[in-house]
Amino acid sequence: MNLSIIIPNYNGEDLLKKNLPLVLKSVKEYKKGNIEIIIPDDPSIDNSGEVIKDFIANITQKNITGKTVSNNDIKEAGFSKNVNRGVVLATGDILILLNSDVVPHEDFLDALLPHFTDPEVFAVGCMDESIENDQKILRGRGIGKWDKGFLLHARGSVDRDNTLWAGGGSSAYSKKIWDKIGGLEELYNPFYWEDIDLSYRALKAGYKIIFEKKSIVVHEHEKGAINTTVNKSKIKKIAYRNQFFFVWLNITDKELLLSHILYLPYHLLTFLLRKDWYFYFGFFFALLKINKILEKRKKYTKLFTKTDKEILVEFKV
């Protein structure tokens, strides 16, 4: 089984220097196939490019190679596009997505890969030892429910193996199924909801997503590109916009769609009273993409074999 490890980068010079050698160390004992470490680089203004080149040039293990691809256009930047750019270079049977602020435990592949002997498994999410405010919080399993016209998602307890989504920063995916269902949706650029969207699309297409608590990574969320380079107001606008995107792209049950429409005046009034103008920005920017959304929706719904209620009944908050 050949592996393609994809580590998207944007201005991550210090993280790359620290973590790339640790990623390499975590996979050096893998002998069941070849490994390629692919580092797609968005238009970084630090020394990331040189760090990546030096790392690739110094890989000496015979079954491990390095690749990179650079994007120099800020208009084409963003997590989904950057990851998809890396996937184009991938030749492995399994894609492993790791954020630049993620370091796997040395045995993380042992529990992760056996799940893919089942051809219906699309993704397997890792256990995140998330470092937040100097505390370790266990993450990696997602749950959600439909409430007042939207999907509300949350962190689930880590004592079960089902998950609503596999996190885009620490999960493995079947390359064959990835290609079939279309990869990360680039409308969500620059970030947020793209991994939930991909997983939900796979679940509705009849595939399986698993949470594997024995495959462990350390995730320093607070050092990632979003938290260090993007202001909070922009994050909120994008999060609201992408929440609309998700519904308009994926929800097909008539009752849920009707509730989305009927609750919209309620939400508009609620956020007006809160003076949370970011919701309005999100809604407006989502509307600007409505033609593209409907085009994508038509393509994705052809894949679906399950209803929304069949999926969501398993993941109540």
Image (spheres, rainbow, N blue to C red):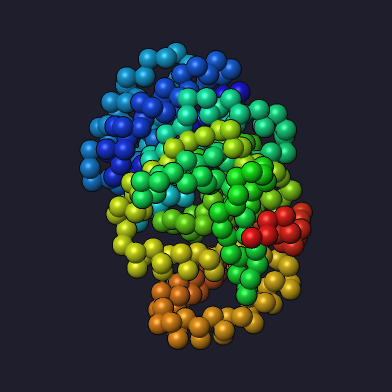
Q: Which residue is pictured at 71% across the width and 45% down the height? A: 207
Q: Which residue is pictured at 42% across the width and 14% down the height? A: 61
Instruction: Name above or below for residue 129 compared with residue 65.
Output: below
Q: On the image, which quarter does residue 60 sit in?
A: top left
Is residue 40 shown left or right of residue 198?
A: left
Instruction: Name above or below for residue 135 compared with residue 234.
Output: above
- Residue 192: image location, x then y, percent: 47, 57
- The answer to whether residue 311 shows anywhere in this view is no
Q: Which residue is pictured at 56% across the width and 58% down the height? A: 154
- The answer to whether residue 278 shows anywhere in this view is yes
- Residue 282: image location, x then y, percent: 45, 72
Q: Which residue is pictured at 56% across the width and 19% down the height? A: 33
- Residue 9: image location, x then y, percent: 36, 42
Is residue 147 shown left or right of residue 227?
A: right
> In the rendered image, which quarter contains the N terminus?
top right
Residue found at the very far front of the displayed protein: 135
